[in-house]
Amino acid sequence: MSQKIISSIDIRADKIICLIAQELQILDKGKILQLIGIGTSKIPVHCLKPLSMEKVKIKEHIIDAISRAEKEARIKINNIYVSISENMSSKYVEHETNIQGRQINEDNIKAFLESEKFKDLYSETDEPLHSFPISFKLDNKKSVSDPIGYNAHTLLTRWHIISAPKNYLGKILDLFNEIEINLKQIVSSNYSSSLAVLSENEADNGATTIEIQKNKTVISYTFDNQLIGYDVIKVGTYNFANDISKIKSISLEESEKIRKQIDNMTNERIYKKKLEKYFEIYSSRAFELSRIIRQIVTKSKYNALVSNNIVLTGYGAKSIMMQKLINKAFKQSNFRLGSTKKINGSKTFLDNPSLVSAFGLLLYAINHDLEGDQDSSKRKKNTIISYIYNFFRNL
């Protein structure tokens, strides 16, 4: 049995989360992750973009979260994976490979990563974080889910690319250089959240992950174990608290406490308590958000592929009202509240939907080897770009 330590930092608008896990490689059972340390540092309620804070302030939050996790794990970390939830863009690129009538192999698909089209993604302003092969067409006619083994003259592959601004990524790299921790990779939280909450069956057969964050709601579409697309709604838990603050003329900090109280209450209990006067404000925003979510999901071009399974997660998923509204909005689908099921540790943390993007980052780390980590002849994947060759059914 071998083991190694994996550390992650999830940079979020509500808090910075540091997780430390021990990876155990058990013979005939594969990799198992055991959570051994967790540290959080709460971001002020008025802050919506933590990396827009003064550098000294955000660095303090990162160091605070890391120190707490290190103290609990009794380990000093040197390397870390980082997930981000801001400043990302998504686009699709098609790449044609000349097969010349031969049998298609994996290298024919990976040829995209050596092409000029891929190199052009590294522009003066942007850099790709993830590249997912999402559909295949042979000789511009026949669409297949897995092209390996087919004979063809040409293979057309459609890729989903997630990119981020270079200056934004550079800012994160500088922060960790100053802290003297090696940044292994930056990962999209849109992707890491889905990795954490979806079962193998859901990820393979299609699922929609609805993550209610502090400053927005992200709807991610997964099919055949790949993130095929996502949508963003600029409404999150902050908007609930801000509505109460503005209408009732109370501080944002006080309204945030009220929002959290209402999250855990049913209608009957609220009307018997002093929070009744805030409930109408809260419920109005909840109905609006659930309506927008349903509208976007049902109109999505991926709806037919991912509508069978709806998973609600994130910082705002603790709201009983939002759970009921989303369940009702997608009553023809399999609905559930999403939490992490693939890591060993305290259920208090693992069952918390607000921590899923951080846990998903740990899962990403054990399933994506990086160039230079070990002998490339012993690895299935040896690139810093996140592509997974579980080949797609036709979209």
Image: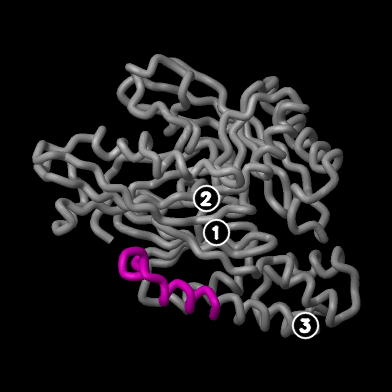
For discs 1 and 2, the disc positioned in front in the rendered view: 2
* Sooner in the amino-acid sequence: mark 1 or mark 2: 2
Query: Residue 371: horizontal and vertical position, in percent?
Result: 46, 23
Tag 2's secondary structure?
A: helix
Q: Number of callouts in the render?
A: 3
Q: What is the three-letter code of the residue carrying label 3?
A: Glu
Residue at the image position 27 percent from the left and 40 percent from the top: 109
Residue position for label 3: 276
Residue at the image position 48 percent from the left and 37 percent from the top: 363
Magenta span covers which residues?
Answer: 291-308
Tag 3's secondary structure?
A: helix
Q: What is the three-letter code of the residue carrying label 2?
A: Ser
Residue position for label 1: 313
Q: Which mark is residue 193?
A: 2
In the rendered view, tell whether residue 208 sits above or below residue 277: above
Dots 1, 3 in contact, CB < 8 A? no
Q: Say which quarter of the image contains residue 307.
A: bottom left
Please identify the quadrant where the C terminus is shown: bottom left
Query: Residue 76: horizontal and vertical position, in percent?
Result: 70, 20
Left or right: 46, with 196 as reference point: right
Q: Say which of 37 and 178 sits in front.
A: 178
Residue at the image position 42 percent from the left and 44 percent from the top: 131
- Residue 130 colored magenta? no
For discs 1 and 3, the disc positioned in front in the rendered view: 1
